[in-house]
Amino acid sequence: MVLICDFRGFERPEMVKRRPVVILASNRDTLQLVTVIPLSHTPPRRYQIWHYRIAGPLKPLDEGPAIWAKCDLLYTLSTARLGLIRIEGRRYGPLRLAAPDFRAIRRAAVASLGSL
Protein backbone atom coordinates (compact mmCIF):
# COMPACT_ATOMS: atom_id res chain seq x y z
CA MET A 1 0.00 0.00 0.00
CA VAL A 2 1.18 3.52 -0.80
CA LEU A 3 0.18 6.50 1.35
CA ILE A 4 1.43 10.05 1.91
CA CYS A 5 3.73 10.56 4.89
CA ASP A 6 4.35 13.87 6.61
CA PHE A 7 8.01 13.93 7.62
CA ARG A 8 7.80 17.53 8.90
CA GLY A 9 9.32 17.91 12.33
CA PHE A 10 12.32 15.74 11.52
CA GLU A 11 15.76 17.38 11.34
CA ARG A 12 17.90 17.81 8.24
CA PRO A 13 19.56 15.78 6.75
CA GLU A 14 16.55 13.56 7.56
CA MET A 15 13.55 13.77 5.30
CA VAL A 16 11.54 16.88 6.20
CA LYS A 17 8.63 17.09 3.74
CA ARG A 18 5.53 15.21 2.65
CA ARG A 19 6.10 12.36 0.25
CA PRO A 20 4.58 9.04 -0.82
CA VAL A 21 5.74 5.94 1.05
CA VAL A 22 5.30 2.19 0.71
CA ILE A 23 4.07 0.51 3.88
CA LEU A 24 6.57 -2.30 4.33
CA ALA A 25 5.39 -3.72 7.65
CA SER A 26 3.28 -2.99 10.69
CA ASN A 27 4.62 -3.28 14.22
CA ARG A 28 3.80 -6.51 16.05
CA ASP A 29 3.39 -4.78 19.41
CA THR A 30 1.36 -1.73 18.41
CA LEU A 31 -0.77 -1.00 15.38
CA GLN A 32 0.23 2.67 15.68
CA LEU A 33 3.70 2.09 14.21
CA VAL A 34 4.61 1.09 10.66
CA THR A 35 7.84 0.70 8.75
CA VAL A 36 7.87 2.63 5.49
CA ILE A 37 10.08 3.17 2.46
CA PRO A 38 9.93 6.60 0.81
CA LEU A 39 9.24 7.02 -2.89
CA SER A 40 10.80 9.69 -5.04
CA HIS A 41 10.81 10.97 -8.62
CA THR A 42 14.48 11.85 -8.15
CA PRO A 43 16.68 9.03 -9.41
CA PRO A 44 19.55 7.93 -7.17
CA ARG A 45 22.87 9.68 -7.82
CA ARG A 46 24.52 6.30 -8.08
CA TYR A 47 22.29 3.27 -8.52
CA GLN A 48 22.68 0.59 -5.82
CA ILE A 49 20.89 -2.72 -5.23
CA TRP A 50 18.73 -1.04 -2.57
CA HIS A 51 17.19 1.32 -5.12
CA TYR A 52 14.21 0.06 -7.06
CA ARG A 53 12.45 1.69 -9.98
CA ILE A 54 8.69 1.03 -9.74
CA ALA A 55 7.56 -0.85 -12.83
CA GLY A 56 4.01 0.42 -12.27
CA PRO A 57 1.44 1.35 -13.04
CA LEU A 58 0.94 3.51 -9.96
CA LYS A 59 -1.52 6.18 -11.01
CA PRO A 60 -1.60 9.12 -10.44
CA LEU A 61 2.01 9.15 -9.20
CA ASP A 62 3.47 7.66 -12.37
CA GLU A 63 2.23 10.43 -14.62
CA GLY A 64 5.59 12.24 -14.25
CA PRO A 65 9.14 10.94 -14.15
CA ALA A 66 9.95 7.41 -13.00
CA ILE A 67 9.24 6.55 -9.36
CA TRP A 68 12.08 5.19 -7.24
CA ALA A 69 11.80 3.34 -3.95
CA LYS A 70 14.72 4.45 -1.77
CA CYS A 71 14.95 1.21 0.21
CA ASP A 72 18.01 2.28 2.21
CA LEU A 73 15.86 4.95 3.90
CA LEU A 74 13.70 2.76 6.12
CA TYR A 75 11.65 4.60 8.73
CA THR A 76 9.50 3.28 11.56
CA LEU A 77 7.00 5.94 12.48
CA SER A 78 3.53 6.68 13.79
CA THR A 79 0.50 6.02 11.63
CA ALA A 80 -0.56 9.57 12.63
CA ARG A 81 1.94 10.81 10.02
CA LEU A 82 0.15 8.92 7.22
CA GLY A 83 -2.60 10.14 4.95
CA LEU A 84 -4.43 9.19 1.79
CA ILE A 85 -3.20 10.20 -1.67
CA ARG A 86 -5.29 12.45 -3.90
CA ILE A 87 -6.38 10.17 -6.71
CA GLU A 88 -8.51 12.54 -8.74
CA GLY A 89 -10.25 15.81 -7.94
CA ARG A 90 -11.57 15.43 -4.39
CA ARG A 91 -11.14 11.65 -4.28
CA TYR A 92 -8.49 10.32 -1.90
CA GLY A 93 -7.37 6.80 -1.17
CA PRO A 94 -4.43 4.46 -0.80
CA LEU A 95 -2.63 3.22 -3.89
CA ARG A 96 -1.86 -0.45 -4.39
CA LEU A 97 1.50 -1.67 -5.63
CA ALA A 98 1.64 -4.60 -8.01
CA ALA A 99 2.81 -7.75 -6.20
CA PRO A 100 6.08 -8.01 -8.21
CA ASP A 101 6.95 -4.41 -7.29
CA PHE A 102 6.27 -5.03 -3.60
CA ARG A 103 8.40 -8.21 -3.58
CA ALA A 104 11.25 -6.36 -5.32
CA ILE A 105 11.04 -3.51 -2.79
CA ARG A 106 11.21 -5.99 0.09
CA ARG A 107 14.30 -7.62 -1.45
CA ALA A 108 15.94 -4.21 -1.93
CA ALA A 109 15.18 -3.31 1.71
CA VAL A 110 16.81 -6.52 2.91
CA ALA A 111 19.83 -5.78 0.70
CA SER A 112 20.10 -2.32 2.27
CA LEU A 113 20.43 -3.97 5.68
CA GLY A 114 23.41 -5.95 4.47
CA SER A 115 22.03 -9.44 3.97
CA LEU A 116 20.28 -11.22 1.13
Image (cartoon, rainbow, N blue to C red):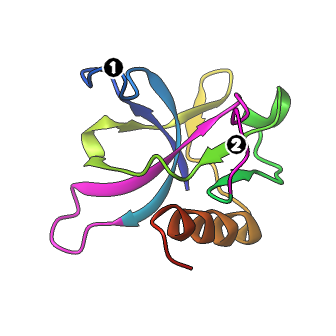
Q: Is residue 45 magenta?
A: yes
- Residue 97 percent coordinates (x, y): 68, 58
- Residue 103 percent coordinates (x, y): 66, 72
- Please tell me the numbered disc located at residue 73: none
Residue position for label 1: 12
Name the one closer to the observer, 72 or 24: 72
Most distant residue in the bottom direction: 116
- 53 to 26, vertically: above or below: above
* Residue pictured at 21% horizontal, 55% vertical: 32
* Residue pictured at 50% horizontal, 76% vertical: 115
- Label 2 packing within 10 angstroms: few (<14), some (14-19), many (20+): some
Select label 2 or label 1 by which is in front: 1
Residue position for label 2: 68
User: Residues at badges 2 and 1 in contact (C-beta under 8 Å)?
Assistant: no
* Residue pictured at 70% horizontal, 42% vertical: 68
| Residue 48 appears in the figure | yes
Name the one closer to the observer, 111 or 69: 111
Alpha carbon separation for disc pair 2 and 1: 21 Å
* Residue pictured at 74% horizontal, 39% vertical: 67
- Label 1 element class: loop
- Residue 7 percent coordinates (x, y): 35, 28
Q: Specify which label sits upstream in the sequence, 2 or 1.
A: 1
Tell me which segment is drawn in magenta: 26-48
- Residue 64 percent coordinates (x, y): 82, 26
Q: Quadrant of residue 83?
A: top left
The amino acid beneath tag 2 is Trp
